[in-house]
Amino acid sequence: MNQHILKSLLVAGLSLCGWPAGLPAQEPYDVWSARLVPAPTDPDTQRNAMNNVRSRVTWLKSTAQQAQSYPNGGDGMVRQALFALCREYATFTRSLTLQQRTYGANELSELAAGLDLLQEAYGNYNQDVAAGRYPGQALRDMCQIMRRAADIWLQEFIVDCARLRVGR
Amino acid sequence: MRLTLTAHRVPLWPRAAACAAAGLVAGLAGVLLTTGCAGTRANRDEPRPREGIAEYRRVTLDAASALRAALKALDSVSAQSNVCSPRVLQAFSAEMQRLQVDSLSLRVRAHAMQARGDAYFENWDAHVQRVRDPGVRVLAERRRPLFEASFQCIKGLTLEARGALAPCVASLRQLRTTLEADPASLGAAPAQELIQSARQNGQQVQRCLADIVAELDLMRALLPETTGHNRST
């Protein structure tokens, strides 16, 4: 219980420091890196993990759509949704079997790179604002790019899950 | 630097890299020969191979098309007299957005190639091991030097394209910010330098993408003969 509280405080603290902006999509999010119990890799777990990722992408797109109307806090909304997607993706990769991870290593690397590039779009927004661009316009552009890029990423994710026979 | 199609025909790679690239090559040959027949040759419970060449060609052409449109929009901005009109600037911004989105698939592959190094190509070796037809494996082995050289070239071109695309997009973004703040700054030196930089880097990316497509077409042209030989056996 104490560990759970400490973990939550650590995550909250890191979030306030803007840590999600640099979240490496290829590393498991879980800050307690040593797992004493292997993650389940049965088809039901994989299907749930896959559906959770898809839900997070939908949430990211929806958030990006709404965030355009909030020039003073919209970027934070998008950042949180992106952070949640990265975390869910890390959970998904842990649900894969060794064979799937080995055979699909290239695909998984590409998906992780895609999440990195989504974060890059967020970083570009910060750079544009710092360079003097009108924040509202920069936010609108970032949100539009984020929505379209998330769509492409999701298409790749679905195709790769089918190739790797995730959840079957 | 533009790479010619004939400069890489001699396989001069170290053995480990040759094997890794051969795995990719053989894997792709196996993938294309088994496309549509995966169910009869592969265990249905095992992951299925991907259609490497066609997919890579598609993402490359998508990126090339978006870049072409962005550079055309840049030309429209550059052609303005002293003040960039809002309509032209808006169109320019829209094409920039499209470029950043439509180049995503190519950029993720470049990222993965660089992150995984030789392991990216070794992964394909696992694919060809799953091809049960011995004839396919023999043919892939026979064509290995040619495919191997092509894929090493494609990797180099992809990384070169990504390296030029980043500063191209950065220049475009800076130019947009400058013109949005002051449309009359178009004729000033900073804006002109950004236009020149974006154009130069963009043209380098275009050359790389064209070479990538040419190499992919070359590989694809090698396959019908391979497939036909397979049928004859």
Image (cartoon, rainbow, N blue to C red):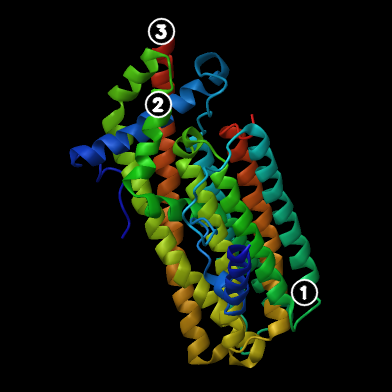
3 or 2: mark nearer the eye: 2
Label 1 chain ID: A
Q: In this rendered view, identify the residue nearer to me: A12 or A103.
A: A12
Image quarter where the N terminus of chain A lies is bottom right
Do the CB atoms of the residues marked 3 and 2 lie less than 8 Å apart? no
Q: CA distance from mark 3 to mark 2?
A: 21 Å
At label 1, counting other C-alpha atoms closer than 10 Å, the crowd grade (few under 14, some 14-19, many 20 or more) is many
Label 2 chain ID: B
Q: Amino acid at mark 2?
A: Val
Q: Is residue B137 visible?
A: yes
**Residue sticking out furthest to the top:** B233
Image quarter where the C terminus of chain A lies is top right
Q: Is residue A16 left or right of residue A34?
A: right
**Residue sticking out furthest to the front:** A1
User: Do pointers 3 and 2 mark residues of a single chain?
Assistant: yes
Task: Give the x, y percent position of residue A109.
Answer: 48, 49
Q: Which SS class for mark 2?
A: helix
Residue A149 is drawn in which quadrant?
Answer: bottom right
Do the CB atoms of the residues marked 2 and 1 lie less than 8 Å apart? no
Q: Is residue A56 left or right of residue B71?
A: right
Q: Which residue is under mark 3?
A: B232
Q: Which residue is under mark 1?
A: A68
Q: In this rendered view, identify the residue nearer to me: A136 or A97.
A: A97
